[in-house]
Amino acid sequence: MDWPRRADLLAQFTPEFEYPRSDLPDTVHFVGPVSQGGGRESTEVALPEWWGELDAGRPVVHVTQVTVANQDFDDLVRPTIDGLANEDVLVVVSTGGRPESTLTGPLPANVRVSSYLPYDQLLPKTDVLVANGGYGGVQFALRHGVPLVVAGQTEEKTEVCARVAGSSTGINLRTNRPKPDDVAKAVRTVLADSSYREAAERIGEAIKASRGVDALVDLIEALVPAER
């Protein structure tokens, strides 16, 4: 697992999300995301008919298991739906590209579901993101200054969830399948304590200020001799 130490160059996202490190190798550089846009697809997807409800005044809680770890919605989506059923929030569910019909069971009146939602349009309207801690999704949320409730213990998710807690941008539930009451409690805490959003917004500003792919190009050009 120590192979990155042998690399001549390591480019990573924002440093504010990482643990403070006194032994960080000088080969590590934080350049920010290589794309600041939402992608071509974000303008091509038809918005659901309930989209206007996002501006109705209730806090918006988005929950997703993204596109890989979304085979069993009982891991996180269903506990979030059940835990927030009686809360005065709008729960927005993305099934990560799977048909909406794959989300079985009763849906409370405050739940809206879509197979896919354009994040560059959804996240500016979102008050809390509940997710399983995939690195890309977490970074996208932080880019928009959205605080998080995370629950993931597979792949890179254990480390990403730990960094969410360490950066004070959200609450780590430290499990793959949280209880509904634990999700609800965490969401209430993040909504009530503005420090989580302030920390997320601080990292979001750093992401916006980063140079991304331009910084990466500069690093590569400095590393590779001109004659090559």
Image (cartoon, rainbow, N blue to C red):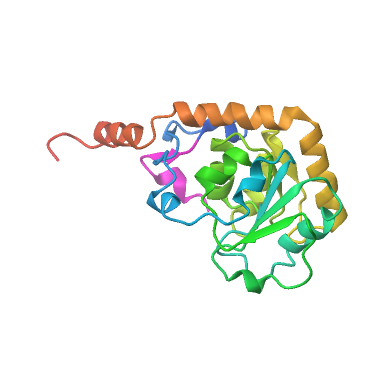
Q: Position of residue 52 (x, y in %)?
A: 62, 46
Q: Which x, y percent locates residue 87?
A: 84, 48
Q: Quick check: is 12 in the magenta stretch?
A: yes
Residue nearer the viewer, 124 or 13: 124
Q: Is 223 included in the stretch rendered in magenta?
A: no
- Which residue shows up at 46% across the image and 56% down it? 45
Quick one: quadrant of the C terminus?
top left
Tell me if residue 69 comes above or below residue 38 in the rendering: below
Tell me, yes or no, if residue 23 can be seen here: no
Q: Residue at x 57, y 45 (%)?
A: 122
Residue 44: x %, y % from top left: 41, 54
Q: How many marks?
A: 0
Residue 100 vs 172, above or below: the answer is below
Q: Nearer the viewer, residue 33 or 163?
A: 33
Q: Quick check: can you spot residue 84?
A: yes
Specify the quadrant of the image occupied by residue 126: top right
Please indicate whether residue 118 sits to the left or right of residue 225 in the image.
right
Residue 21 sits in which quadrant? top right
Eyeballing the image, is 73 above or below 202? below
Residue ID at (53%, 47%):
119
Q: Which residues are magenta?
A: 1-13
Asked which quadrant contains residue 49, the reply is: bottom right
Residue 89, position as x, y percentages in the image: 77, 46
Residue at the image position 70 percent from the left and 33 percent from the top: 168
